[in-house]
């Protein structure tokens, strides 16, 4: 069995902007870990609530930025001063499990061919309102059923060898708001031949409290729309996490069910097609609805189904808009960064150290 003392040194990097009590809980969870990190680096990204001072009281290395530059630039700033072999990026609104950090180190110790890894939210979200429970349980389920060979990175709970992060140039700092900067980094890693592993047992608890308008705006303008444009720009295959075949078919069924419902007002025969579409939508997502039922019961599941179908509808609409912007040449995502050092070259450099 591998010795814990032989594990690579792990530097935790946390970008924070007015983190509040959730940030304090995040830092507390790190101090309560079974294994302590080599260092904790906090980048106070223009915060005005004293988050930087809270970080100092926990003994973190604090980098203060006068004006917010966004999480991509903040993570890059933290990584630039990190001294560990592994950089573990953690969001300010999550808490680590006691074994999270230990598991991260073991993966890199035991799997020399793994260049980066991502984890998962757990199945016990911190905020108790329905929407936060639904949103985070959906995220947990999606990661738990996905392939362990990932094609994207995840900034909330993602670790990467420092040498690899430097080789690909880090996050694209032109993403000045929380967006798809981690997904874009993952695509760049894969294009260069690096391996990203989804480690389902490495979990963190999400503390964020979601509200309806906030969640829909985030899904459309910070996820679905820019992600669509990124997929089209880089010609990425749609086969990972939320882009699996059943998700794409669910979007089609959601639009078909709504369209046939509208037709049914004047053509009653269309009602049967609408019911068939809804049945198809239910069948495609039977696994997640069963999971919701086991976790929270029938009433929660019925509400979750309605929100889930709405999610497919507005995500599909955002995909259509992204297609239009791409072909009209009005896309708003940055141009691709230069091709990074390829993986086999980087591995030779690592192996000679």
Image (cartoon, rainbow, N blue to C red):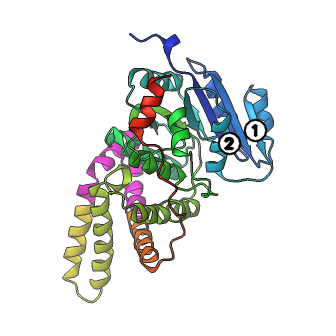
Which quadrant of the structure image shows residue 89?
top right
Which badge, 2 or 1, comes first in the chain's sequence?
A: 1
* Contact between labelled residues 1 and 2, with CB atoms less than 8 Å apart: yes
- Is 293 a magenta residue? yes
- Relative placement, left or right, of 146 versus 156 is left
- Mark 1 lies on residue: 63
Rendered location of residue 117, percent (x, y): 44, 35
- Relative placement, left or right, of 97 versus 18 is left
Nearest-to-viewer mark from 2 and 1: 2
Query: How busy is the neighbourhood of tag 1: few (under 14 within 10 Å), some, or many (20 plus)?
Result: some
- Mark 2 lies on residue: 77
The magenta region covers 282-311
Query: How busy is the neighbourhood of tag 2: few (under 14 within 10 Å), some, or many (20 plus)?
Result: many
Q: Residue at x 45, y 35 (%)?
A: 346
Q: Residue at x 45, y 49 (%)?
A: 188
Rendered location of residue 69, percent (x, y): 70, 53
> Is residue 35 placed above or below 229 in the rendered structure?
above
Which quadrant of the structure image shows residue 21?
top right
> Is residue 157 placed above or below 212 in the rendered structure?
above
Q: Nearer the viewer, residue 66 or 174?
A: 174
């Amino acid at each position: 069995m591998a010795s814990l003392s032989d594990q690579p040194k792990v530097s935790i990097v946390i970008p924070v902007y007015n983190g509040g009590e959730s940030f304090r809980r995040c830092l507390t969870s790190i101090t309560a870990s079974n294994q302590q990190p080599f260092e904790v680096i906090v980048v106070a990204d223009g915060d005005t609530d004293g988050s930087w001072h809270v970080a100092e009281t926990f003994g973190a290395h604090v980098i203060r930025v006068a004006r917010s530059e966004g999480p991509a630039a903040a993570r890059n700033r933290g990584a630039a001063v990190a001294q560990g072999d592994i950089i573990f990026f953690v969001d300010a609104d999550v808490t680590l499990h006691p074994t999270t950090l230990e598991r991260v180190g073991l993966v890199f110790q035991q799997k020399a061919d793994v260049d980066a890894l991502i984890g998962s939210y757990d199945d016990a979200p911190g905020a108790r309102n329905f929407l936060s429970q639904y949103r985070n349980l959906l995220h947990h389920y999606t990661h738990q059923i996905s392939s362990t060979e990932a094609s994207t990175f995840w900034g909330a709970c993602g670790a990467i060898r420092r040498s690899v992060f430097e080789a690909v140039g880090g996050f694209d700092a032109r993403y000045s708001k929380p967006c798809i900067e981690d997904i874009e980094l993952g695509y760049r890693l894969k294009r260069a031949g690096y391996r990203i592993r989804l480690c389902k047992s490495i979990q963190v608890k999400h503390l964020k409290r979601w509200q309806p308008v906030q969640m829909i705006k985030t899904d459309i303008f910070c996820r679905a729309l820019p992600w669509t444009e990124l997929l089209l720009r880089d010609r990425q295959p749609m086969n990972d996490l939320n882009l699996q075949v059943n998700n794409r078919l669910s979007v089609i069924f959601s639009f078909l069910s709504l369209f046939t419902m509208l037709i049914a007002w004047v053509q009653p025969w269309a009602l049967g097609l609408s019911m068939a579409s809804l049945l198809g939508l239910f069948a495609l997502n039977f696994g997640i609805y069963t999971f919701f039922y086991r976790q929270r019961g029938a009433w929660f599941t019925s509400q979750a189904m309605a929100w889930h179908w709405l999610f497919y509808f507005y995500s599909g609409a955002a995909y259509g808009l992204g297609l239009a912007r791409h072909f009209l040449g009005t896309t708003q995502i940055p141009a691709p960064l230069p091709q990074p050092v390829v993986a086999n070259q980087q591995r030779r450099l690592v192996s000679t150290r």
